Image (spheres, helix red, strand yellow):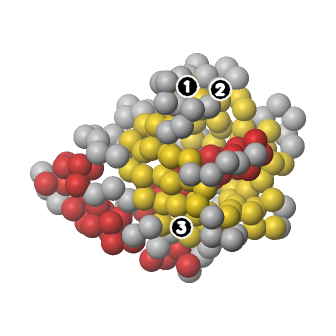
């Protein structure tokens, strides 16, 4: 897949749906979050028609600030990793850890908490709030345990929809890349609810 990747939310759907496209506009993933579920449940497909599931993402508990979201291969059901919000560390500034079993592999951190706060506040203002998507662009960085920058996710200017871009800054193996992308998708779904 060719970077940067472009993510966009479908506007008309009751359940959240995200299209992930590569630099050549080819569909990489089509993500569907199940509506009205007590526990988060997300399916990642290879096609927009939702006929070829690739991965599933399921929360380990009901509505919890520190829930763990487990990734599984849709064909075999085999566990391939997980991401967990770091409770109180995420209260002000988003902080997630990507895990392989119980071992932390990568970290996602919000670059600047004030950007998201301002985006959220301005978004609530009548009329002006419609333009907040053009003004503020929260960003998140993915790093290895040694601090090496791997990927960066940034919100893009958009009117009435969510658009994001993922840039890659270091080489990853196939499994590490899959875990990182699934973690960023889950982060978008969770943080979008926070503002």
Tell me if label 1 and label 2 are in contact, CB under 8 Å: yes
Q: CA distance from mark 2 to mark 3?
A: 27 Å
Residue name at image x 76 percent, y 46 percent: 173
At numbered mark 1, what does the secondary structure look like: helix, strand or loop? strand
Tell me if label 1 and label 3 are in contact, CB under 8 Å: no
Q: Which quarter shows the N terminus? A: top right
Residue 169 picture location, percent across and down? 56, 51
Residue 142 picture location, percent across and down? 58, 60
At numbered mark 2, what does the secondary structure look like: helix, strand or loop? loop
Tell me if label 2 and label 3 are in contact, CB under 8 Å: no
Residue name at image x 33 percent, y 40 percent: 161
Q: Earlier in the sequence, mark 1 or mark 3?
A: 1
Q: Quadrant of residue 11?
A: top left
Q: Which residue does the numbered mark 1 point to in the structure image?
A: 27
Q: Which residue occupies the foreground of this view, 120 or 178?
A: 178
Establish if 101 lies above or below 112: above
Q: Earlier in the sequence, mark 2 or mark 3?
A: 2
Q: Which residue does the numbered mark 2 point to in the structure image?
A: 46
Q: Which mark is residue 109?
A: 3
């Amino acid at each position: 897949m060719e970077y940067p990747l472009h993510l966009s939310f479908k506007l008309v759907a009751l359940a959240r749906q995200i299209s992930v496209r590569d630099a050549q506009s080819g569909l990489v993933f089509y993500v569907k979050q199940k509506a009205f579920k007590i526990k988060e449940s997300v399916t990642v497909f290879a096609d927009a028609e939702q006929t070829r599931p690739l991965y599933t993402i399921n929360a380990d508990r009901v509505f919890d600030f520190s829930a763990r979201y487990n990734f599984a291969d849709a064909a075999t059901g085999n566990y391939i990793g997980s991401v967990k919000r770091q409770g109180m560390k995420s209260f002000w500034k988003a902080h997630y850890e990507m895990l392989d079993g119980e071992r932390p592999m990568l970290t996602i951190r919000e670059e600047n908490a004030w950007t998201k706060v301002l985006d959220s506040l301005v978004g609530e203002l009548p009329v002006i709030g419609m333009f907040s998507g053009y003004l503020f662009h929260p960003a998140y960085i993915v790093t290895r345990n040694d601090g090496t920058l791997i990927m960066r996710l940034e919100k893009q200017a958009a009117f009435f929809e969510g658009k994001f871009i993922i840039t890659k800054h270091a080489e990853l193996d196939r499994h590490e890349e899959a875990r990182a992308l699934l973690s960023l998708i889950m982060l978008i779904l969770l943080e979008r609810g926070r503002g």
